[in-house]
Amino acid sequence: MLTRVVRLVWVAGFLVGTTTHVVDLVDGGRDVYAGFPIGVRAYWVSLTVLDPVAAVLTALRRRSGVVLGVAIMVSDVAVNATVLATTTGLGSWGLILQAAFGAVVAATAPRLWRAAADARGAASSPRGR
């Protein structure tokens, strides 16, 4: 039961990220994230694809979802913290919420990793079919 809740939290979190970036793109168009370095802009736009992929892979109980989810959160918190420290125009509240979600992802990744292995083992065993 706890693993299911954790999985739902991950999926919801990555879908919130997806929504945020889609809204940004719709509102900002070609000039989305204007004023920020080009690499940062490209990274943030890429999250429009990576976040929902992480959500789907996590929902499907794939280990690749765990790896992608952790990679997204580590890199996103690092990028946004660097941007906050070196430029203007990025609020700290979003980073605080993001870091909190990143901490949840880091703390619960081993549970989802094990659950994905268990699900894979059950599916491949004669009893699991």
Image: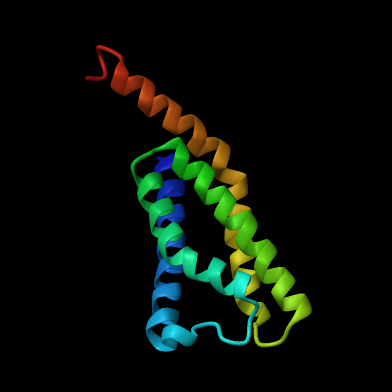
Q: Residue at x 45, y 73 (%)?
A: 21
Residue 91 as seen in the image, left or right of residue 14 = right
Decide which of 42, 11 is in the foreground and name it.
42
Q: Residue at x 44, y 32 (%)?
A: 115
User: What color scheme is it?
Assistant: rainbow
Decide which of 6, 56 is in the foreground and name it.
56
The quarter of the picture where the N terminus appears is top left
Q: Is residue 60 above or below residue 115?
A: below
Q: Is residue 15 above or below residue 41?
A: above
Q: Position of residue 57 (x, y in %)?
A: 38, 45
Q: Position of residue 127 (x, y in %)?
A: 25, 14
Q: Position of residue 106 (x, y in %)?
A: 62, 48
Query: Which quadrant of the view contains residue 3?
Result: top left
Q: Residue at x 48, y 64 (%)?
A: 47
Q: Is residue 128 above or below residue 39?
A: above
Residue 50 as seen in the image, left or right of residue 100 = left
Count the marks: how many? 0
Residue lying at the far left of the rendered structure: 129
Q: Residue at x 33, y 21 (%)?
A: 122
Residue lying at the far top of the rendered structure: 126
